[in-house]
Image (cartoon, grey):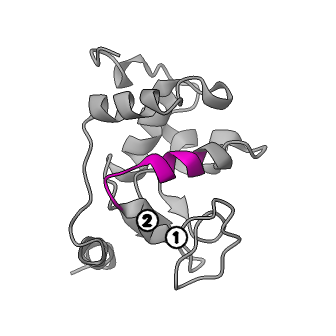
Amino acid sequence: MGVLGLVTLLACLSTGGRGKIFTRCELAQELQENGMDGYEGYSLANWVCLAFYESGFDTAAVGANADGSTDYGIFQINSGWWCQDAQSPSENLCHVRCQDLLNPDIKDDINCVKRVVQDPQGMEAWDDWKNHCEKQDLTEWIESCNL
């Protein structure tokens, strides 16, 4: 089993397998209900695109980084700055435990990404957004979602 497989397995075990993989439209609706459409100038489609490339819409996603930090949840929120875990020191700017970002209730994840995009980098804080979503036609991400 590779490192990525092991990390994924550990994430599932640590959350008791209680994560959720959203559909594209389920996520779009949840984000819209939580005020993300147009938040800090980013369309709903940007947020859906980001979540797809960061986690495949999986709330239990965990990713290890070369610097020793870990990314958590559907938006892959980094433990070095935004949430507190047991493995690495953190600024914990979202005032949340990283483990709390791995369950199906993404309200704390949404509150944290709202904080992340208030920084000057905005959504450029996520490389996957820069590489796959920025300056792209993102209409397909919310197409046919009946929002």
Q: Amino acid at mark 2?
A: Asp
Q: Amino acid at mark 1?
A: Arg
Q: Is residue 64 above or below residue 106?
A: below
Q: Secondary structure at mark 2?
A: helix
Residue 96 magenta-drawn?
no
Which residue is at 63% across, 71% downward?
80
Crowding at mark 1 (Cα within 10 Å: few <14, some 14-19, many 20+): some
Any mark on residue 113, and which? none
Q: Which image quadrant for residue 79?
A: bottom right
Q: Position of residue 10 (x, y in %)?
A: 29, 78
Residue 111 magenta-drawn?
yes
Hey, which residue is sitting farthest bottom in the picture? Answer: 87
Q: Secondary structure at mark 1?
A: loop
Q: Position of residue 68 (x, y in %)?
A: 56, 80
Q: Is residue 16 above or below residue 21?
A: below
Which residue is at 40% across, 52% downward?
74
Which residue is at 46% across, 26% downward?
45
Q: Nearer the viewer, residue 128 or 112?
A: 112
In the rendered structure, are the residues bearing label 1 and label 2 in contact, judged by CB atoms less than 8 Å apart?
A: yes
The residue segment tinted magenta is 103-113
Crowding at mark 2 (Cα within 10 Å: few <14, some 14-19, many 20+): some
Q: Position of residue 108 (x, y in %)?
A: 49, 53
* Viewport quadrant of the N terminus: bottom left
Q: Is residue 74 left or right of residue 80?
A: left
Any mark on residue 100, and which? 2
Any mark on residue 97, and which? 1
Q: Is residue 64 above or below residue 78?
A: below
